[in-house]
Image (cartoon, rainbow, N blue to C red):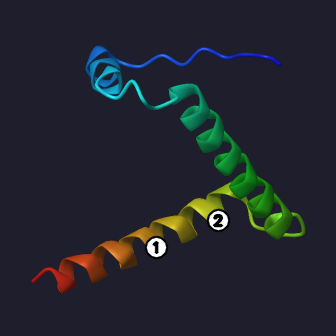
């Protein structure tokens, strides 16, 4: 099985060491697996799309702005 190296800052490493019961390699493997699965779904959903990367970024910005506004309104 191939291996990878993940760099973390000293603070994060110290915090990880406070939990020796956790298999951090497994946590990392699962996080990567979940991200790949999400990307696979996104690729499948957008495979026939004619949107450009710029179009997608513009839509994402609008969604993020709308969500941010809703959260700010709820916290008032």
Mark-to-mark CA distance, 1 and 2 = 11 Å
Q: Determine whether the residue tagged by mark 2 lies in a helix, strand or loop.
A: helix
Q: Which residue is mark 1?
A: 62
Residue 24 coordinates in the image, percent (x, y): 51, 28
The quadrant where residue 15 appears? top left
Q: Is residue 61 left or right of residue 56?
A: left
Residue at left 52%, top 29%?
A: 23
Q: Determine whether the residue tagged by mark 1 lies in a helix, strand or loop.
A: helix
Q: Which residue is mark 2?
A: 55
Counting other residues with Cα less than 10 Å from the Cα at mark 2, is it few (<14), some (14-19), or many (20 or more)?
few
Q: Is 4 placed above or below 38 here?
A: above
The quadrant where residue 67 appears? bottom left
Q: Specify which label sits upstream in the sequence, 1 or 2.
A: 2
Q: Is 43 placed above or below 2 here?
A: below
Q: Is 14 placed above or below 46 here?
A: above
Q: Is residue 30 left or right of residue 45?
A: left
């Amino acid at each position: 099985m191939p291996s990878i190296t993940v760099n973390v800052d000293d603070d994060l490493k110290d915090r990880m060491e406070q939990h020796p019961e956790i298999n951090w390699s497994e946590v990392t493997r699962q996080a990567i697996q979940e991200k790949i699965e999400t990307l696979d779904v996104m690729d499948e959903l957008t495979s026939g799309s004619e949107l450009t990367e710029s179009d997608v970024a513009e839509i994402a910005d609008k969604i993020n702005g709308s969500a941010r506004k809703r959260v700010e309104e709820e916290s008032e």
